[in-house]
Image (tube, rainbow, N blue to C red):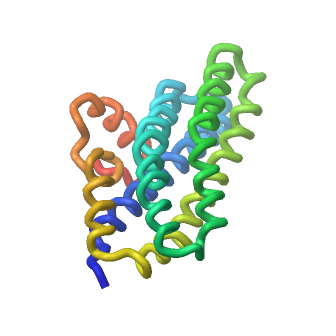
Amino acid sequence: MADTTAALRIIRDEHAALASVLHALLLLVRDARHRNRAPDFRCLRAMLFYVDEFPERLHHVKETTMLFPRLRELTSEADAVLKQLDGDHASGARRVRELEHLLTAWELLGEARRPAFERALDEYVEFYLNHMRVEETAVLPLAERCFGAADWLILERAFGTHRDALAGAEPEAQYAALFRTLASVTPCAPR
């Protein structure tokens, strides 16, 4: 069997970083409700920006353009699952924009807009955690069985080209402030 460790570690670390941000989003919103106050909107916006900037624009693109097509070339075993996951990826940017809009509405128009944001956030987090669970329980094990060393090397290089500091990499200078903000409120984030 080919050495799959590096590519799978990067993918799983990025999933864990995203899950940490999603859980932190929920915790911050619920804590604000519990304390009967407004949340730190700047921090929530930073978290949604992270979701859009890293998982949506970098991570998903590599799954959709490299990981999933290569699996389809090697087996039809996961065609239905891959189709669903590709659909999830295609709708991801729209879903993040909706959350950003609902958050801005809450911040600018007040408390009456909180419930819509909270509902949408709960749905999004459930959707996204399920999406990653399917990738990790159905897609990655299938890739482990089907891919060769060259496939894993290509994925390792592709996923290694961006540096998600929440997944343990050193952030690019332009993202340093973002990651400092996220690390201050995200459980399990590297400090």
Q: Give the side of residue 154 with respect to residue 181, left or right.
A: left
Residue 25 picture quarter: top right
In the picture shown, does residue 150 fall above or below 1?
above
Identify the image quadrant of the N terminus. Answer: bottom left
Residue at the location (40% across, 55% down)?
14
Residue at the location (65% across, 58% down)?
84
In the picture shown, does residue 133 fall above or below 112?
below
**Residue nearest the observer in this picture, 180 or 79:** 79
**Residue nearest the observer in this picture, 26 or 160:** 160
> Residue 46: image x %, image y %?
45, 31
**Residue nearest the observer in this picture, 25 or 77:** 77
Looking at this view, name the residue that lies furthest to the front.
Answer: 73
Residue at the location (27% across, 33% down)?
176
**Residue nearest the observer in this picture, 189 or 11:** 11
In the picture shown, does residue 184 fall above or below 139?
above
Q: Give the side of residue 141 with respect to residue 107, left or right.
A: left
> Residue 140: image x %, image y %?
47, 71
Residue at the location (54% across, 47% down)?
22
> Residue 160: image x %, image y %?
27, 53
> Residue 180: image x %, image y %?
31, 36
Looking at this view, name the residue that lies furthest to the bottom.
Answer: 1
Disc tally is 0
In the picture shown, does residue 110 fall above or below 151?
above
